[in-house]
Amino acid sequence: MTKQARHIGQALGLMLVAAVALTGCDKDPVANGDRPDPTEPVNLPVIGQGRHESRYTAEVAVRNAFAYTTTWHHRSAPGNAIFVWDVTGVPSLADSVIVHGASTLGDIQISDDGALVVVAKEGAPGFIVIYDASRPDSLVELSRFSSNDTNAGVHTVKLGRVSGRLYAFLSVNLGGSNTPSRLVNVDITTPVNPTQVLARPMGLPFIHDTFVRDGILFTALWDGGLSIWDIGGGNENGTVADPVLISNIVTVDGHVHNMWWFHNPNNSEKKYVFVGEESGGAVGATSSGDVHVVDISDIENPREVAFYNVPGAGAHNFSMDEPSEMLYAAFYNGGVRALDVSGDLGVCPDSARASDGRCDMRLAGREAGIALSTGDPQVSIWGVAVSGNRLYASDMLSGLFALDITALKR
Amino acid sequence: MVAVAPLLAIALAVPRPIHAQMAGSDNRVRLGAHAIGMVSRVDPGIGGVVETDGYLTQPMIHGYATLWSGLFTIAGTLNLEGLTMPGGELAPGNAGEGFIDRRHPHTFMHELMATFSPQLTGVDFTLSAGRGFAPFGTDDPMTRPFVRYPANHHWAQILERWTITAAARLGMFTIEAGLFNGDEPEAPEDIAGLERVGDSRAVRATLRPVHSLELQASHAYVESPGFRAGPGLDHRQWSASARLDHALSPSSRLYVFLEMAETNEYDGDRKVFVFTSVLGETAWRPGPWTAALRFERTTRPEEERLDDPYRSQRPHVEASILGATRWNTVTAHAARSFPNGGLRFEPFAELSRSTVDEVTGAIFDPLALYGSTELWSLSIGLRMTAGLQHDRMGRYGAALPPGVSHADHEMSMTGRQ
């Protein structure tokens, strides 16, 4: 072989290597936006914190200038308070509301028009409280709803509008071996007169959460998996008062805790449901449970295509920045994790594929952002809520963090 | 008063143990009753508040029948705590069956066990079945010198289960193996669990090298004890103990007891939590007086509490706990007995000091909940007994020490006669 031929061969070899490398890059499904180093997650900066330590903080909801947090369990004071935070700057306490008759609160929700705030009261006797939020910094109680079906305690409440009417979807967990868990749907269109339209036993053994969008209801049924119901938006003639099951999937390891149906405004896809798994741990020190990605492009045959695992920490509640194609997940002692959910989540290099065929989102480079994960300060992040360029994270131990997510904006 | 009435009736009607001969066979039935009237003060209770409460605790009626010359025996205990203390007994550090920092009332059918004793050569073999204790761990605390239960009750005993247990004693060695239902009771009237018999198992080995000394080791697999439907965490439990009950003189006895227990909680094959206990107790009984001292170091889970902070969710929702606390408790007990025929009255005082720490780094903060990490409790009361008393509670048939049965128990430190 001549020297020239060797050079040509070396050049061709380099071109081949480059082509393979470029092909590999093309196969990388992650669109990394403006991240400085797309292979490394961004550390999301803390803008500030509103501190509260006499009660454990639970869920967070935010709209415009105000955020609401609930409280939970017994610390030096019981979990019977809703805190109202002014979040125009660093979160600062604007008001607090004591929920009489409560010692542990769960979810808090803001209606889509901002007119109402609804909070769930856990433990027997369970109920929801509906507040007028027309002055968002000064909630006024409008009504309470309870029934025999809520008596065991309302673990979560989600709001959803179906056919022009506003509903509260209550997850009521079992009140002993003889009282099964159940979904309770309440029409709160007239908030001073909430009306129960459904109580249906479900869950193995728990029903933990619901998610409602476009007339489709998702229920998190623990080891019973994720169920998808037509409540007016499907083709099964279902209604809120009589949901019709479309399909069910038990994600790997069960313990289905919460979910989010992703509507991608950039391509109009409604393909993925993100499922939170909550497994065992000592809250604040250890936790476990993955984020599972379920492809429902064939809604009657959902399939799990990917997962995200944080060693030593477990998933809790979600929020999304859908235009930026970012999923934010509370991870208790693991802080906050941001996942890039653009593109096809079921496609990944073989090196990122688990033995069961699912894509490992961390190995696929989809871990886009991290916050509050170092252990200093110790945190136990319960919930997250996106608003503009900020993410609000409720910390059971210390109150409400505001994080800057500008780096992950698209 | 509903519960006190039968006790008084038995006490008055049965000044001495019953030895009722049944017609046509060598059969006999014995009855007994027991109760403790008590006032307890805990400082601090939850929220830094001093709690004072009074109740009739451990009200029980015992029955023991020997049939066909001992071929069959039946042991029964009716426990009336569900009537006399439905809200439980103030007990910092105790936890179980939906109660926390209060001891739960036991079920009305505390035990009802039938034992078949075939006459075999060379080995003492029995087969017991019914509702009672699984062959695991140590004696029920109510048959030991102290009134207040230790925090390790659910780590060191498995009781109120439908159980089938085989026991064989050969010389100084005894082995037991049993099947039972893993689910623990949910309420005093609860007798459910038959459908789960066999999902849990235990084996216990006992060595008695000399008459007064007993060494024990046992292991149990308990399926989903806190969740009857079955999806709760499973327990793999270990126990080891040494028990000395020795006569120092005709009127004086010494009792020394040491135990270690460990409970591993599993989610499937994954170990999730581990809880441990070390306990030592001793008692000296010169004549009518009793002086006893106990040290205990036990960890327990901290679960989500309900509106009543002395209660926790049952079944436990989700899979997480708020942390684990270690309770170091020293308890001193003094009492004097006043026997009167078949009746016995024993005024007592019991003082405990507990310290509590969170040991996992989780969010639970005992200082925030109690206002202090040092808790004191004082109980003063009167123990009343009539007729038959359980000398050992937690064993049946061949597993009982030689020469000791529920019907013919010897005078001992713990079996109060």
Image (tube, coloured by chain):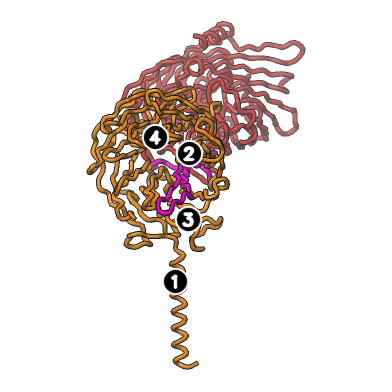
Q: Residue at x 53, y 23 (%)?
A: B187
The residue at which mark 1 appears reads as: A21
Callouts 1 and 3 close, C-beta under 8 Å: no
Q: CA distance from mark 2 to mark 3?
A: 25 Å
Q: Residues within 10 Å of mark 2 (few under 14, many from 20)?
A: some
Q: Is residue A245 left or right of residue B363?
A: right
Q: Is residue B301 magenta?
A: no
The residue at which mark 2 appears reads as: A215
- Dot 2 or dot 1, earlier in sequence: 1
Residue span colored magenta:
A254-283
Callouts 1 and 4 close, C-beta under 8 Å: no
In what element is the residue under mark 2? Answer: loop
The residue at which mark 3 appears reads as: A345
Is there one chain holding both mark 1 and mark 3? yes
In what element is the residue under mark 1? Answer: helix
In what element is the residue under mark 4? Answer: strand
Is there one chain holding both mark 2 and mark 1? yes
